[in-house]
Amino acid sequence: MSFMWSSIFNKPRLCLSPPSCRLLHVGQRASLTKAFSARDVQLFAELTGDNNPLHLDPAYASTTSFEAPIVHGVLINGLISAVLGTRMPGRGCVFLYQEIRFPAPLYIGEEVLAEAEVRKIKMSFAFIAVTCSVRDKVVMEGEVMVMMPEEQQKKE
């Protein structure tokens, strides 16, 4: 016998047969926050080769509609990977699919909140809604599919 926590009601749930209990549940949420520095953006550009001056050169960025350097979209998306790989579902999950949009820019130094919420679970796959936002401004949103770690898959 073991107790497992239900994220929906925040009350312990008794599982008489632990292998049939799933650790991940529809409605479960996880998040993290981060502010990217100019050095973070520079390191990302060096690692990937994406040296677009919109991200790296304040003088160039000032001539665009953004008026200041913005964080690479894929770097923002990396926060979702961190939420999924370290918090929910956590260690051992495999990122299989994503569909993302970037409705607004993330500026260097802004603190962004990356959030994920389980919307559906089918067999060993979790379908998760994701957002990254700065206060009320959404800078990234979308849906992802992950294969859950084996210990979180429901055994029939």
Image (cartoon, grey):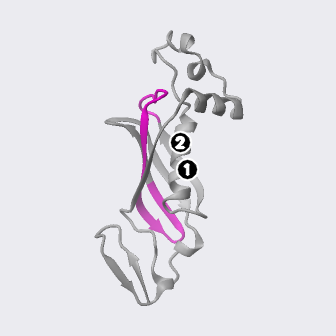
Give the image location of residue 13, x and y in percent.
Answer: 35, 80
Q: Residues within 10 Å of mark 2 (few under 14, many from 20)?
A: many
Query: Residue 47 lies in magenta, yes or no?
Result: no
Three-letter amino acid code of the residue under disc 1:
Ser
Query: Residue 103 lies in magenta, yes or no?
Result: yes
Give the image location of residue 19, x and y in percent.
Answer: 51, 84
Q: Residues within 10 Å of mark 1 (few under 14, many from 20)?
A: some
Three-letter amino acid code of the residue under disc 2:
Asn
The magenta-colored residue range is: 102-128
Depth order, front residue of 143/79: 79
Depth order, front residue of 86/138: 86
Location of the N terminus by quadrant is bottom left
* Quarter location, residue 9: bottom left
Q: Is residue 155 above or below residue 109?
A: below
Report the residue at 58% width, 63% height from top.
91
- In the picture of the structure, the residue carrying the numbered disc 1 is 81
Report the residue at 64% width, 33% height from top.
44
- In the picture of the structure, the residue carrying the numbered disc 2 is 77
Report the residue at 57% width, 37% height from top.
74
Disc 2, SS: helix
Give the image location of residue 137, x and y in percent.
Answer: 35, 33
Give the image location of residue 80, x and y in percent.
Answer: 51, 48
Disc 1, SS: helix
Q: Are marks 1 and 2 in contact (CB under 8 Å)?
A: yes
